[in-house]
């Protein structure tokens, strides 16, 4: 790559990285706010909160990349053109293709990275996030006890705890259990902890007592230094992890298992997601082409290109909205998946046509004799 090509690429790469980092930070803040209830309501650790936030990033970054690339390309190209650096390139004998090649190479590289995110990193992160959320939802410690509140984790079972320490120790524990035969048992303990004994979850209570009324109304009372309360019935559930289309790999989307009822009924939806994974990286090339068309596709102006930039921004937004519409429409009609590829490719072709076939307006001069006659 020649020196001027490397220079143009550096001028584009820096703003692209900066815009991507800024938009990613905003997206991460938004995602972290939506995941905050993991700490507030589910009493999960900060590590789980950070894990959920980070695992959501690949999908968000894929949506951010075309926006960041478009903004960075417009800013960089506009500055280069206003400061006449691109004009100097043309004056030095560089062709239009040589001038726009660094931008297109950047767009193609970003598109390739976006494709890798779509095919491998996003489904891997999404599956791990789904697994983590499943574990949070079935977390016995969070389900059983809420600090300072009475909870009913199962029919006939009421639990109260005054405080829950950061290490999981439950303080001043109260449990009331109504049995199927009509008997009632009340447990109190200074402290307790959820643990595993013999492969089954249990609540280990220490320094407490229990009071039991049998169905005959006889009261039995005893104190204990340690008592094991079986939590197995709470853990026995039939919940399984169901992967959404966004969690699946490409081969699972394009070749669904039609023996499965859900996949058979939603195969068009799976195909639409699969084609979107393949087509969405093309928008990175399309937005670069639109930015080039806005700045280089017209005549030079010292006053800037605000009007052309505004029109191009509207065209880029319209293009992406049409892409989302095409994906949604493809979920009911599989043949419409062709539109997911056609929209960015047509936008790229039209934008490059504007770069190489710009219209140059000329002012027709009047002959000197005509000017003299008009003056007379």
Image (spheres, helix red, strand yellow):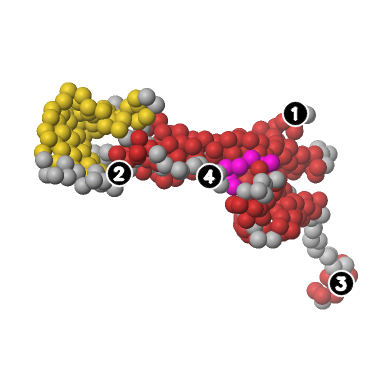
Query: Label 2 belongs to which residue?
Result: 153
Query: Label 3 belongs to which residue?
Result: 370
User: As displayed, is residue 119 above or below residue 322?
Assistant: above
Chief secondary structure of the magenta portion: helix
Q: Earlier in the sequence, mark 2 or mark 4?
A: 2
Estimate the x, y position of residue 79 in percent, counting from the top left.
Answer: 63, 43
Circle 3: element type = helix
Label number found at residue 3: 1
> Which residue is painted at 86% across and 72% down in the image?
370
> Which residue is painted at 13% across and 28% down in the image?
223
> Which residue is painted at 59% across and 39% down in the image?
123
Packing grade of label 2 (10 A; few <14, some 14-19, many >=20) is: some
Q: Nearer the viewer, residue 332 or 305?
A: 332
User: As displayed, is residue 167 above or below residue 325?
Assistant: above
Question: Marks 2 and 1: CB-CB under 8 Å?
Answer: no
Gap between marks 1 and 4, in whole Å?
53 Å
Query: Label 4 belongs to which residue?
Result: 242
């Amino acid at each position: 790559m020649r020196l001027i090509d490397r220079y143009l690429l550096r001028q584009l790469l820096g703003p692209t990285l900066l815009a991507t980092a800024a938009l990613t930070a905003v997206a991460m803040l938004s995602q972290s706010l939506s995941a905050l209830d993991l700490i507030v309501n589910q009493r999960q650790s900060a590590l789980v909160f950070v894990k959920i936030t980070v695992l959501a990033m690949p999908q968000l970054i894929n949506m951010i990349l075309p926006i960041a690339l478009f903004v960075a390309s417009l800013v960089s190209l506009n500055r280069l053109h206003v400061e006449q650096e691109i004009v100097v390139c043309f004056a030095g004998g560089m062709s239009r293709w040589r001038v726009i090649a660094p931008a297109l190479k950047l767009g193609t590289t970003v598109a390739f990275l976006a494709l890798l995110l779509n095919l491998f990193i996003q489904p891997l992160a999404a599956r791990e996030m789904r697994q983590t959320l499943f574990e949070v939802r079935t977390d016995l410690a969070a389900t059983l006890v809420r600090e300072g509140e009475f909870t009913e984790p199962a029919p006939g079972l009421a639990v109260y705890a005054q405080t829950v320490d950061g290490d999981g120790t439950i303080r001043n524990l109260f449990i009331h259990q109504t049995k199927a035969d009509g008997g009632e048992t009340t447990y109190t303990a200074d402290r307790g902890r959820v643990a595993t004994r013999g492969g089954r979850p249990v609540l280990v209570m220490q320094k407490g007592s229990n009071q039991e009324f049998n169905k005959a109304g006889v009261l039995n009372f005893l104190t204990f230094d340690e008592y094991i309360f079986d939590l197995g019935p709470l853990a026995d559930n039939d919940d399984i992890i169901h992967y959404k289309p966004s969690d699946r790999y490409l081969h699972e989307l394009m070749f669904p298992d039609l023996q499965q009822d859900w996949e058979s009924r939603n195969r068009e939806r799976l195909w639409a997601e699969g084609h979107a994974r393949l087509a969405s990286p093309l928008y990175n090339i399309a937005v670069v082409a639109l930015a080039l068309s806005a700045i280089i596709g017209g005549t030079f102006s010292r006053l800037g290109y605000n009007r052309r930039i505004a029109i191009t921004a509207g065209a880029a937004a319209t293009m992406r909205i049409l892409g989302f519409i095409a994906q949604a429409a493809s979920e009911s009609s599989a043949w419409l998946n062709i539109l997911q590829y056609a929209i960015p490719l047509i936008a790229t072709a039209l934008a490059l046509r504007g770069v190489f076939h710009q219209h140059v307006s000329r002012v027709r001069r009047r002959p000197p004799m005509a000017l003299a006659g008009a003056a007379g």
